[in-house]
Structures are given as structure tokens and as C-alpha cells.
Amino acid sequence: MLTLPAPAKLNLFLHVVGRRQDGYHLLQTVFRLLDFSDELSFRLRDDGLIKLLTPVKGVPENQDLCVRAAKLLKVSSGVKLGVDIVLKKKIPMGGGLGGGSSDAATTLMALNQLWNLNWKNEKLLKLGLQLGADVPIFLFGQNAFAEGIGEKLTAVTLPAAWYLVLVPSVHVSTAEIFSNKELTRNTIPIKIPPFSIWQGHNDLEPVVCGAYPEVSRSLEWLKKLENTTIVTMSGSGACVFAEFPSESEANAAYASIPVEMKGFVARGLDYHPMCKSAK
Ligand SMILES: C[C@@](CO)(OP(=O)(O)O)[C@H](O)COP(=O)(O)OP(=O)(O)OC[C@H]1O[C@@H](n2ccc(N)nc2=O)[C@H](O)[C@@H]1O
Ligand SMILES: Nc1ncnc2c1ncn2[C@@H]1O[C@H](COP(=O)(O)OP(=O)(O)O)[C@@H](O)[C@H]1O
């Protein structure tokens, strides 16, 4: 068994700067990888079948992003092998933390190895984008400024930071938020780095807060905390987070969350844990 992590991400800001003709939105965002991961294990099968031994509740096996990633790589490479996948989910689903996309990226990297394909990272990145706009960042393997729909990536160095992430108990559909009439799509594009991560905002946040009061309440609670450097929503929500310069400040804030709120503290990473530079 090959066992590998699939880390979560945060969008430190997310600007919607336009819309493509196919309806997809043009974004500018900074992705920060988190030391908070799903775990995937892979066992080679020589009968060509792709099996998820631990289906996720509410997600049919053939729609799970790791199964879709494995099938796409199998068809694209023409390989005759298969795989058994065991997925231990820890990242909240549909939370704007990119869990499904990260599972897909880890699957592509694992099978590139297990099936002896030796595909270059750029080729995997292109394939990954077919599965979702968030998949490329996890294959890129380090924090990045992203443009386009999330595929034009420029590496960025971010300060050490810890995050208190709140997980409201609502499921937000990414497609629903992007199609909302109230969404503003005209934030003025910023220039590529250097820029300040602290001056950004999330254009999807007012739309999600309007539709889901629990997200709004969680955000308001975070905004009252002291010593935070960023407080915003990640991606299309529902998770919201506060950034702190030290672990002790993040833990102290976590210790004070009201009983009805759920969350966790995680360290910001510089690299994907599967990246050579991370070791
Ligand atoms: C908003 C972001 C920010 O990082 O993250 P999440 O909140 O999903 O984590 C991403 O852009 C989401 O990426 P991902 O979750 O992979 O989205 P996809 O499956 O590609 O798209 C879901 C749907 O959202 C809409 N969509 C998505 C991305 C984009 N740039 N413009 C869009 O309009 C499209 O309607 C699409 O059908
Ligand atoms: N392995 C997976 N993990 C999580 N979600 C998955 C997975 N495979 C498919 N999905 C589907 O993708 C949707 C978005 O999942 P996720 O990536 O966790 O959230 P987000 O796009 O908000 O960051 C889920 O609601 C679920 O229906």
C-alpha cells in the first residue's frame, strides 16, 4: 500500500475580475496550503479495475474525484493496470477547502508513480484542470498566486502563520454562488507579485453570507478576535478563517469558540507535503 496525504487549501483572498465566454469566472487568488489533510492509500491491481474501497457518504463512487482522476489518467495514458483506493476523509466537504480537488491531485501523483507513467508535472497539471479549477494548485505543490480560473500559477512565499478555521454546518454549492445575480465580477485586477495579501477580499463572501446566516455569524465572531492578520471566507465557503502570526494565539482563539461552532487550527505550509522541497 502506498499511503499519501491530500492537504487542504485556503484562499487568502479571492477576487472575481471577469467572466469567460463559457461562463467560468476569471479569478485572482492566493492559495495557501494547510497542514490538515485527507489520507489516501493505493494498492496496484493488475485486472485494470479502479475501486474506491471507502465510498464517501453522499458521493456515488463513479463521481468521487479520486475515482474520476484515476479513470481519466487510465484513459489518457492507455495503461492496462488498475488500483484499489482507500480514502480517509478529514477535510470538510464542500467547505471551500479544496478537499475533493486535493484528493484528485494526490491520486494523479500516486498513480503516475504506481503505474510507472513518468508523466511530467506540466502534463499532469493540464489533465488535472479537466477535473476542477482547484486541482492544479495541488499538483503545483506550493503556495501560489493564481489567475485565469485557477490554472495560471505563480509561486509566492508567505509568512509563517496559523489558521483558526470555522466549519459552519451548511453545504454551499460552488456553481450556485458563481451564478448568483448579486455577485460582483469587476474587481480591478491587481499586478502579479509583489502585492499585499492583507489588502485583498473575497468577492463571493457577501453572496454566501446573504444566503447562509450561519456563515455570516461565524465570520462576525472571528472579526471580534484580537491579533488576527486576515479574517475572511475561503473559496466559495462555507468555511471561514482567521490568520494568526503564532500557534499560541490561534489555539487561544480556538479555545474560546462558542459551543455551537465547530472548527480546527492548522499551520500554513510552504509546500505540498508530497513535494521534494517540503522534506
Ligand atoms: C471557488 C474556488 C476557489 O479556489 O474554490 P472552492 O470554493 O470550490 O474550494 C474554485 O475556483 C472552484 O474550483 P472547483 O471547486 O474545482 O470548481 P469546479 O468544479 O471547476 O467548478 C464548479 C462550478 O463553479 C463555477 N465556476 C468555477 C470556477 C470558476 N473560476 N468559475 C466558475 O464559474 C462553474 O459553474 C463550475 O461548473
Ligand atoms: N473525494 C471527494 N472529497 C470531497 N468531495 C468530493 C469528493 N469527490 C467528489 N466530491 C464532491 O465535490 C464537492 C466539493 O467538494 P470539496 O472539494 O470538498 O469542496 P470545495 O470545492 O468547496 O472546496 C462535494 O460536495 C462532493 O459532492
Image (cartoon, grey):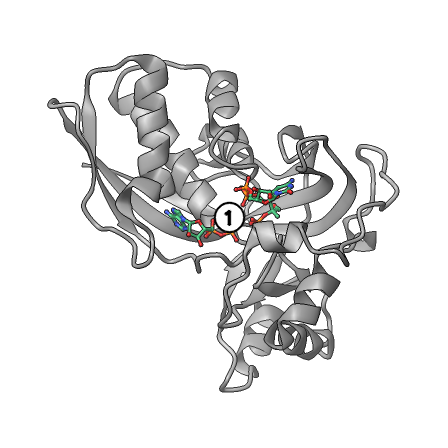
Residue situated in front as seen by the camera: 177 or 195: 177
- Res 229 visible: no
- Res 36 visible: yes
Residue 130 horizontal/vertical position (percent): 49, 29
Left or right placement of residue 194 versus residue 162 in this view: right
Q: Residue at point 37% right, 16% down?
A: 76
Q: Which residue is mark 1?
A: 98
Q: Residue at point 73% right, 74% down?
A: 223
Q: Residue at point 61% right, 65% down?
A: 240
Query: In the picture shown, does residue 235 fall above or below 120?
Result: below
- Say which amino acid is labelled 1: Gly
Kindly give the residue lying farthest to the right in the view shown.
188
Query: In the picture shown, does residue 76 fall above or below 245?
Result: above
Residue 237 horizontal/vertical position (percent): 59, 60
Residue 73, quarter of the rendered image: top left
Q: Residue at point 49% right, 72% down?
A: 169
Residue situated in front as seen by the camera: 253 or 113: 113
Kindly give the residue lying farthest to the left in the view shown.
47
Location of the C terminus by quadrant is top left
Location of the N terminus by quadrant is top left
For ligand 2, tell me if the residue under mark 1 lies within 8 Å.
yes
Numbered circles on residues, count = 1
Residue 165 horizontal/vertical position (percent): 56, 65
Question: What is the secondary structure assignment of the residue under circle 1?
Answer: loop
